[in-house]
Image (spheres, helix red, strand yellow):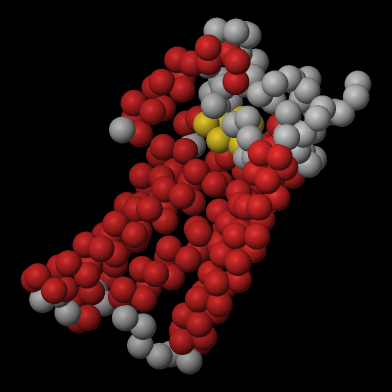
């Protein structure tokens, strides 16, 4: 079967994110290294800095597996019978269904984690200014658990169930996300091989 004609959009969607992803990986790595060195030296680390550290970890992972790897984790022609279909072709695809599922799960989990930690960081700054929260209060073990644990529970609670419904599939452009496979089954143009429109609807209902 001849190779499809790749459009400029398909090529740019697979290549350009790698640049931003690489820059994000470097920035997050330096931030994590800085905090880790302070820990090693037993230096005091402000709670907001720990929150930024918690944001940097999932951002680093997401930058690598989603932004840098892009279509490298999408099933290639040898694993994807729809590889040359209009919505299922992926430029530089070199993965398998397993790698696609892994990319979708890890990326979505990390995006949710970072987003929730960002929200908590904003709450910390607001309460520090408005209610006078101190480092003494924020250094309490119970306080830190109350801030660090819920985002992990919520994120995994939303991203693990789609694994059982085979909802992590190629999104049609550059990465694997929550979408039935092939994409045409969303519009009733083809039977769903993985996932379904019903399970997709339930997921977004829970997300909202």
Between 66 and 8, the residue placed more toward the observer is 8
Check the image and name the residue furthest to the front.
Answer: 8
* Residue 146 visible from this viewpoint: yes
Between 62 and 133, the residue placed more toward the observer is 62
* Residue 95 visible from this viewpoint: no
Q: Is residue 88 left or right of residue 176?
A: right
Q: Is residue 64 left or right of residue 107?
A: right
Q: Is residue 150 left or right of residue 166?
A: left
**On-image quarter of the N terminus:** top right
Percent coordinates x, y for residue 135 in the rendering: 22, 81
Q: Is residue 93 left or right of residue 128?
A: right
- Determine the residue positioned at 63% across, 9% down: 190
Check the image and name the residue furthest to the right.
Answer: 1
- Determine the residue positioned at 46% across, 50% down: 111
Percent coordinates x, y for residue 118 in the rendering: 34, 59
- Determine the residue positioned at 60% across, 49% down: 66
Percent coordinates x, y for residue 27 in the rendering: 55, 72
**Quarter-of-image position of residue 86:** top right
- Determine the residue positioned at 43% across, 70% down: 53
**On-image quarter of the C terminus:** top left
Between 57 and 17, the residue placed more toward the observer is 17
**Quarter-of-image position of residue 72:** top right
In the image, is residue 143 above or below residue 89? Answer: below
């Amino acid at each position: 079967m001849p190779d499809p004609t790749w459009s400029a959009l398909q090529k740019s969607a697979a290549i350009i994110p790698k640049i931003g992803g690489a820059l994000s990986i470097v920035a997050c790595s330096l931030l994590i290294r800085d905090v880790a060195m302070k820990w090693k030296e037993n230096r005091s680390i402000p709670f907001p800095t720990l929150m930024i550290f918690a944001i940097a970890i999932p951002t680093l992972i997401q930058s690598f597996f989603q932004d840098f790897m892009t279509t490298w984790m999408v099933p290639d022609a040898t694993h994807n019978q729809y590889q040359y279909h209009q919505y299922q072709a992926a430029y530089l695809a070199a993965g398998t269904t397993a790698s696609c599922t892994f990319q979708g799960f890890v990326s979505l989990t990390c995006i949710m984690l970072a987003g929730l930690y960002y929200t908590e960081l904003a709450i910390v700054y607001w309460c520090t200014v408005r209610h006078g929260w101190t480092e003494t209060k924020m250094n309490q073990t119970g306080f830190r658990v109350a801030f660090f644990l819920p985002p992990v529970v919520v994120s995994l609670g939303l991203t693990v169930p789609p694994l059982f419904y085979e909802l992590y599939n190629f999104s049609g452009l550059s990465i694997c996300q929550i979408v039935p496979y092939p994409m045409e089954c969303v519009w009733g143009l083809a039977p769903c091989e993985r996932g379904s429109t019903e399970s997709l609807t339930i997921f977004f209902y829970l997300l909202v």
